Image (cartoon, rainbow, N blue to C red):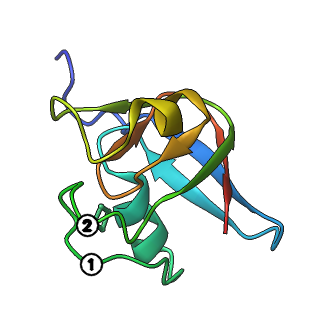
Amino acid sequence: MAGTGAAPLTYQALLQPSGRRFAARADRTLLASALEAGFALANSCRNGTCRACLRPLHAGRVAYRIEWPGLLPEEKAGGWVLPCVAYPQSDVVLGD
Ligand code: FES
């Protein structure tokens, strides 16, 4: 029975300063969840290279499934994320 019919793990994402919220599934990128909720966040390549979606992560944690998305180490350390390839690991607050 393990896993059958289980609801996907879902976190809350908040866009600041607009205050818009959307459900962010752990198995989907933040961009995919935002678009599904009807929020047209800037994007282009959707594979972590063009940086069109770059925005600050004010709170929460994300993980990447690709080795090193197109973020400089300083940006990563400074809290910038690429929502097109970032999977939430907690509730998150993103700049919009
Ligand atoms: S859309 Fe290109 S890096 Fe995110």
Quadrant in which ligand 1 is drawn: bottom left
Quarter of image, res 31: bottom left
Helix, strand or loop at label 2? It is: loop
Do residues under tags 1 and 2 come within 8 Å of each other at their CB atoms? Answer: yes
According to the picture, the residue beneath numbered tag 2 turns out to be 50
User: Cβ of disc 2 within 8 Å of ligand 1?
Assistant: yes
13 on left or right of 2:
right
Mark earlier in primary sequence (1, 2): 1
Instruction: Give residue 86's position: percent from left, percent from top.
Output: 37, 44
Tell me if residue 5 comes above or below residue 36 in the rendering: above
Q: Find residue 2 and report its horizontal and vertical position in percent.
A: 19, 15
Position of residue 17 measured from the top left corner of the image (x, y, whole percent): 83, 67
Find residue 44 and name its label. 1
Can you tell me whether the CB of the residue at mark 1 lies under 8 Å from the nearest atom of ligand 1?
Answer: yes
Identify the residue at the far top of this view: 2
Q: Is residue 2 above or below residue 13?
A: above
Q: How far apart are marks 1 and 2 (CA)?
A: 7 Å
Q: In the shown orientation, is residue 48 left or right of residue 92? A: left
Residue type, mark 2 in image? Cys
Label drawn at residue 25 = none
Camera-side residue of 86 and 23: 86
Where residue 25 appears, x then y in whole percent? 42, 46
Q: Residues within 10 Å of mark 2 (few under 14, many from 20)?
A: some
Disc 1: CA contacts within 10 A as few (<14), some (14-19) or many (>=20): few
Identify the residue shown where x is 48% and y is 84%.
40
Q: In which quarter of the image is the N terminus?
A: top left
Q: Which residue type does callout 1 highlight?
A: Ser
* Mark whose residue sits in front, 1 or 2: 2
Report the side of 57 relative to 64 (left or right).
right
